[in-house]
Image: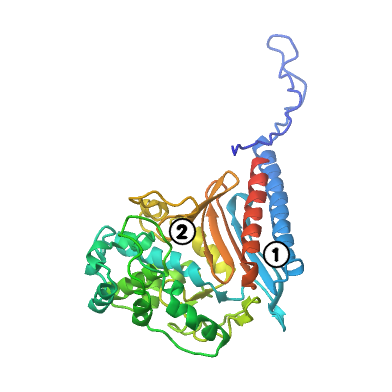
Amino acid sequence: MTFSKQWFAASTGAELSGASGLIGAKSEQPPPVQPEFGAVEACCAIHVRREKATMLQAKAQILVSNLVRADGAPGATAYIIAPKLDLETGVAAGLTEKSGGEPLTTAHPVRISSLTKPFVAAAILRLWEMGKIELARSIHSYVPAEHTSILKSGGYDAEAITVRHLLSHTAGLRDVFYTDAFAQLLPKLMSGQVRHCFTLEEQLKMAMEGGPRFTPGDAFEYSDTGYLLLGAILEKVTGKSMAAATRELVGFDRLGLASTWWEVLEVEREGVLTRAHQYEYACGWDSYDEDPPHDLFGGGGMISTSRDLATFFHALFHGQVFQRPETIHVMISVAKTTTPRNQNDFVYGHGPQIHSVGDVTVYAHGGWWGLDVGYVPELDMTLCVVGLRRDIRPRYSVAFDELILEAARLHIEQ
């Protein structure tokens, strides 16, 4: 897809002669009025941008409304930041819970599950910028001795696993949430039958089931366990809690992420709206029934809004999180593996996923409960879509992609 800029120049009309045809004679015509072409052009461009912004906002409203009316989600939201269209807007449809509740808005927080990972990755890369960790160095230097012992008991060599392996899901660690032990607990946890606040150590021990998946660096396999260990690294290196370290390193307050916090690990933010319910209809689960949540330590655990998520991702790609411009390129780089990746593997950098929508590249991440956020460099646009019904999760991704395609179409027509 080739993007070009169309200029909207005003018609100049006929030029007026400055002489009567006689040498030295003065024209009796009044001085010509030269049109201010730049001002006309600018005014026309502003009008076109507003028109396109209105079209994109209308498309977003239609898509989230369809998620509610046609697909049966209790509620859905989208938030768009598109500077080239002078647009920052949020749209919403439905309610905060299926039994009633209040009208859903982009200011209602939700559990963001795996969308926590880009925040953790950004915090780790900030430590790297500050010279406090090395990405190619063994995690043995950075994790507590207790965690090294747990890894050893499961057949892992902490000396062979690097920080980069954890960030890029190439460490060979079994995903704690896909073990038999956790699978037996999940229905009880989600229904509220069992209430248990896991420790990081408990989850790490659970992940030792079955031993290593592969030698570090040999392949790619998405694993929440790696991000548990990144959380532990944040705590050991900074001497602060994972939540406090992430908040400070990423700069939550500086970026204006007023409705973003770690559940359980932090006190709920003052002045925020009540958290919306998120559902899995097929299993009869309500996010309010699982209290506390099971994913508190880096693989998940945060609460945020579609507005805050879009703001964070936009800041990442506009030099507002990292101190050095090259850091974002490290974040979106894809680690090479010894063996070829499986054809069905999605491409994952060091925090964000990387995929194509049409002919544009999107740096994005999704969350288990049903939400997506991403940045499109070709359009300089950031987008977040949140839905409150997990069992139609693919429909949210379709809406996400459709909005990007619409923005690309509008961009081409400029």
Question: Position of 123 compared to 413: left or right?
Answer: left
Dot 2: within a 10 Å radius of its alpha carbon, few (fewer than 14), some, or many (20 or more) residues? many
Q: In the image, which disc is placed on residue 64?
A: 1
Q: Amino acid at mark 2?
A: Pro
Q: Residue at x 57, y 86 (%)?
A: 191
The local secondary structure at tag 1 comes to helix
Q: In the image, which disc is placed on residue 216?
A: none
Question: Position of 202 compared to 367: left or right?
Answer: left
Reply above or below: 135 against 51: below
Tell me, yes or no, if residue 293 can be seen here: no
Q: Give 286 or 402, whichever is nearer the viewer.
A: 286
Tell me, yes or no, if residue 11 can be seen here: yes
Question: Position of 276 compared to 51: left or right?
Answer: left
Q: Amino acid at mark 1?
A: Val
Q: Percent from the top left, x then y, of residue 207?
A: 37, 74
Q: Earlier in the sequence, mark 2 or mark 1?
A: 1
The coloring applied to the image is: rainbow
Of all residues, the one furthest to the top in this rendering is 23
Q: Residue at x 69, y 59 (%)?
A: 60
Looking at the rendered image, the quarter that the C terminus falls into is top right
Residue position for label 2:
352
Q: Give 13 or 388, whichever is nearer the viewer.
A: 388
The local secondary structure at tag 2 comes to loop
Q: Percent from the top left, x then y, of residue 338?
A: 33, 50
